[in-house]
Image (cartoon, rainbow, N blue to C red):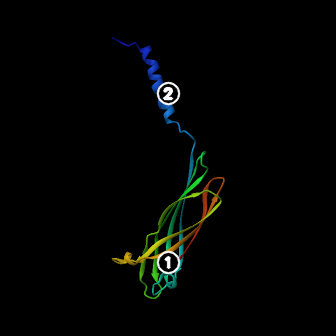
Amino acid sequence: MTNPIPSRLPIAFSLLLAGVLAALPAQAQTSTVSSFTLPVSGNASSVKTGLSETVMFSGSVIVIATVVTDPALGPTVVVFIDGRGVTGTGKQTKTTYANTCVANLTRPFGPSDVIQTTFAFFQNAPGGYLSSKTGLLTLNLTYNTTTMALTNVTASIGTP
């Protein structure tokens, strides 16, 4: 039994239409990605950390902001922070300190935002992480609300 070509066309057309409709998004979403690498410095006081000396921090922090617009929920920002490029040095002993400053945060979108996140820092030596202390990274972010791009970031380091 043969099936003539005209009787196969409706099936082929239905499959093609289903494929096109499945490829269309349910609602239009857009995203804007901005990236900054900025220098940061600051001190962790011995009074607040319990260490015998103040630790001076300096280095680079990477901030990547992805603004996502969703017609149902409104715009939000996913902010990725990588502060592992920052190192600490003991003021008197010159001991080197490493840190674990990595964060991925979801925030409401607006013209500006202040983010404060804590991080662990410790002597850059075997087992140093066992006696870690807490530092505080503060970021001030500014956005262009028309383009939804991150336009400026400033940062400082201290202790909570």
Residue that appears at 41% across and 15% down: 5
Residue 107: give x, y in percent of width and height: 57, 58
What separation in Å lies between label 2 and label 1 (alpha carbons)? Answer: 60 Å
Q: Amino acid at mark 2?
A: Leu
Q: Is residue 100 left or right of residue 32?
A: left
Q: Secondary structure at mark 2?
A: helix
As drawn, 23 above or below 60: above
Picture residue at 46% right of the left edge, 70% below the top: 85
Q: Earlier in the sequence, mark 2 or mark 1?
A: 2
Please give the label number shown on residue 94: none
At horizontal 47% and vertical 31% (from top left) the residue drawn is 19
Q: Secondary structure at mark 1?
A: strand
Circle 1: residue type? Phe
Name the outermost residue toward the top. 1
Q: Are marks 2 and 1 in contact (CB under 8 Å)?
A: no
Badge 1 local density, few (<14 within 10 Å), some, or many (20+)? many
Q: How many marks?
A: 2
x, y percentage for residue 29?
Answer: 57, 45
- Residue 87 position within the rendered picture, expressed as x and y whole percent measured from the top left: 45, 75
Residue ID for mark 1? 57
> Toward which corner of the image does residue 125 lie, by quadrant?
bottom left
Picture layout, residue 37 above or below residue 23:
below
